[in-house]
Amino acid sequence: MVILRVFEQGFRTANRRLRMTVYLWLVNFIFSVLIVTPIYFLINREYSRSLAAEQMTGGMDLLWLGDIIYKYQDIFPALVGWFLIPGILFALLSIYLNGGIIGRIVAQNEKMSLANFFGDCGRYFFRFFRVFLITLLGYLIVFGVIFSIVSALFKIWTKNASSEWPLIFSSNIKFLVLVLLFSIVRMFFDYVRVRLVVENSKKAVRATLSNFSFIGKRIFKAWALYLLVGLVTVILAVIYLAVYQLLPKLGFMLVVAFIWQQAYMFSKMWTKILFFSTEYHFIQAHKPSLP
């Protein structure tokens, strides 16, 4: 099958670009440390000598979080800004890094280097930023209009329900529709980014419009390939969670748990490359028919 062959090609490309996975993990790790460090010192100052410190190692606790928000309520707006601004910066960082990822995937025969990677990051940043703005419009249309219509139809169906089962069933179906719509929109604009690099084009709007024809003719193949890579992502996440829950969160095992977390983050960077790699090879497989 074409899908399996393309998946295999993308898998091999992602493995050949393993050094790029290291770059991505390192950049994301440094960014996370810069964001988390001030919050860590704040929590350490308040709870390092209390029993609550032991509970925090098990995960987020709304009680201590509420307590610290109450105590520092005067600076809470600043804390919100502290999270909001990094969120915007992280979005820009992702756009920037996507240029390097796709650029190095397309440059199959070139040697992988840090200079080439960041060179592609800068080269494609503004093209991808325009795609990002168009993507926001796409999400607004899909979730603000299409999903609202779907929700309204389910609401009509469950309006006179005599038991809770139709409500449970409809909520599950709506969630599934939400996830599927999200995957389609994300996949669509992934192909727009890849095509901009493959065709060395700066016209984001034109690439978006022509992509409707390309994806529309082979939507099920492209979507099946995307979901196949998504399945790999889910499997890795399940393995991570299963092992993480078994790890004790005391003493030296905290270090082991941290290493395991970073191994999972590394796998997420790898699957991100796998998504773009399979999409690149899918485009190459249908290149003669590109509009």
Image (tube, helix red, strand yellow):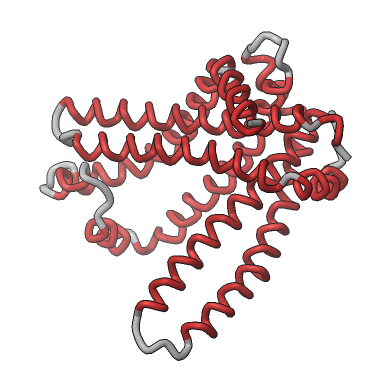
Residue 10 in the image, given as x and y percentages of width and height: 61, 25
Q: Residue at x 36, y 77 (%)?
A: 165
Q: Is residue 36 left or right of residue 290?
A: left
Q: Is residue 101 left or right of residue 27?
A: right
Residue 244 in the image, given as x and y percentages of width and height: 26, 36
Residue 188 in the image, given as x and y percentages of width and height: 70, 47
Quadrant of image for the C terminus: top right
In the picture shown, does residue 191 fall above or below 182?
above
In the picture shown, does residue 65 fall above or below 228?
below
Q: Residue at x 70, y 29 (%)?
A: 280
Quadrant of image for the N terminus: top right
Q: Residue at x 67, y 14 (%)?
A: 115
Residue 24 in the image, given as x and y percentages of width and height: 54, 26
Q: Residue furthest left?
A: 51
Q: Nearer the viewer, residue 288 or 57?
A: 288
Q: Residue furthest front?
A: 1
Q: Residue at x 54, y 61 (%)?
A: 178
